Image: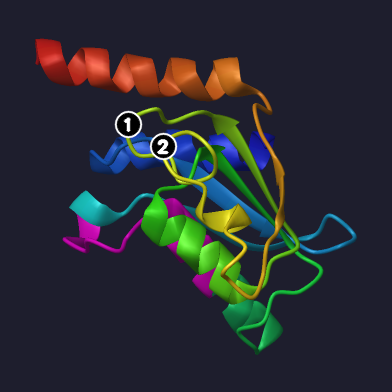
Amino acid sequence: MRAALAEAEAALGTGDVPIGAVVVDADGIVLGAGRNVRERDADPTGHAEVVALRAAAAARGEWRLSGCTLVVTLEPCTMCAGAAVLSRVDRVVFGAYDDKAGAVGSLWDVVRDRRLNHRPEVVAGVLAADAAALLDGFFTQQRSG
């Protein structure tokens, strides 16, 4: 999670919402890292999770990320939760809950939907206070600036 938080902090330099993600293999080796790049790249799919999943798939040379864990600072949205399911990661670990758009238990629960053909394990609330503080600081600055 600390690596994901470092990615989130790096997103601040581009004006993007500070969300970071990493994909690690079964040995804990980072295969892909990402941060929000929606503002920087003018890309609506430029979410940290998608960036990290793409990088991990490229590093592996295949789209199936079985045996891997997606670690992200904020509970994934519907798009990112769907990407986690479709990439076949074994687990999703996230920091802060997202009551407004979270799709891993808060608002929706995409990753545990029995109708889908893959359901990763979920570990929630890891370093949640650190992730939330980074987001809170960003949005406080946005509102005052």
Which residue lies under the disc numbered 2? Answer: 107
Which residue lies under the disc numbered 1? Answer: 100
Q: Nearer the viewer, residue 128 or 130?
A: 128
Q: Where's residue 109, x and y in %?
A: 52, 47
Q: Nearer the viewer, residue 38 or 90?
A: 90
The amino acid type, in three-letter code, at marker 2 is Leu
Q: Above or below — where is 26 with respect to 48? A: below
The amino acid type, in three-letter code, at marker 1 is Lys
**Residue 124 occupies quadrant:** top right
In the image, which is nearer the foreground, mark 1 or mark 2? 2
Number of other residues with Cα within 10 Å of mark 2, as a class: few under 14, some 14 to 19, many 20 or more: some
Disc 1 to disc 2, C-alpha distance: 7 Å
Return the mark for residue 141. none
Among numbered discs 1 and 2, the one appearing first in the sequence: 1
> Residue at left 49%, top 67%?
83
Residue 42 horizontal side relative to residue 48, left or right: left
Instruction: Check residue 107 for magenta coloring.
Output: no
Instruction: Check residue 52 for magenta coloring.
Output: yes
> Residue at left 67%, top 82%?
64
Residue numbers of the magenta segment: 40-54
Q: Above or below — where is 79 with respect to 100? A: below
